[in-house]
Amino acid sequence: MNVGDPVAVVGTELVLDLDGTDPDGDRLSYRFEALDLADLDTRATIALTPSGSGVFRWTPLASDLGEHAIDFVVSDGALETTITVTITVVDPITAPIFRAPLGSGTTLDLDVSPCLEVEVVVEDPDSTQVQLAHLDEIGGATLDQRDGLSATWSWCPTVEQRAVTRHTLVISADDGEHPRRSRTTSSCCVAAGLRRRHAPTIRVKTTTRPRRRARPPTRVMLRPAT
């Protein structure tokens, strides 16, 4: 049965579910063979699940780059069925990297200005067009993307917003092919006339949320010949 073309990433574990069935109800076993990967049996495993299915696990090396035809065999002890799956191993993917805003966060000094502008800058080794977005939007704030790698986040807090000393800003960067990266930082308001008496502490947390990298297991259906 055709299961598509699984893609594996160097350094990332690939998981394939092997779902075999037997009309006679016999206990099944699984194994794999790869002519062009002579040492694969020392680096990949198949484990049986309580339900009798198999789980294939393999973490490719840089030397495994390219396409590999791997035979998966299911046996009921007397008969066997083989299915060949072509697995393509690719280079590790690179997500966009934030260069700004700084991880220390930003403080809005209302003695100086009633509004705040934050420069957002990313770099991507293999793309010049990255979509920047404002997640968990702060009321009244806008994000103006100037080009494929930079934008300006602007915000003029209301009287009610000024009463809250810390606001969380989350910006995401997505190049459409690699894992989306988001930066969580803080914007702090310092009320006019109180700047020297209050020094807010700013925390920053950078997270990467995978989109393509975390691939669901590919299901392989195997049925022994009768």
Image (cartoon, helix red, strand yellow):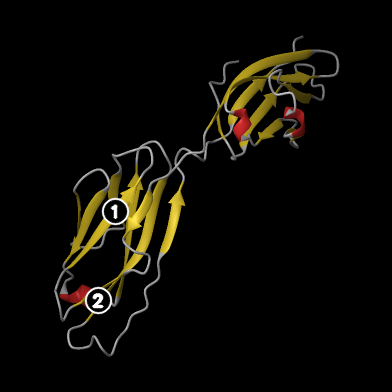
> x, y (%) of residue 33?
73, 21
Of residues 87 and 83, the one nearer the viewer is 87
Q: Are marks 1 and 2 in contact (CB under 8 Å)?
A: no
Point out the image quarter for the N terminus.
top right
Task: Identify the residue at horizontal 75%, vertical 37% (top origin).
Answer: 50
Q: CA distance from mark 1 to mark 2?
A: 23 Å
Q: Residues within 10 Å of mark 2 (few under 14, many from 20)?
A: many
Above or below: residue 120 compared with residue 187: above
Q: Quadrant of residue 225?
A: top right
Callout 2: SS: strand
Above or below: residue 15 compared with residue 5: below
Residue under pointer 1: 121
Residue under pointer 2: 189
Three-letter code, disc 1: Val
> x, y (%) of residue 150?
25, 50
Above or below: residue 172 compared with residue 71: below
Three-letter code, disc 2: Cys
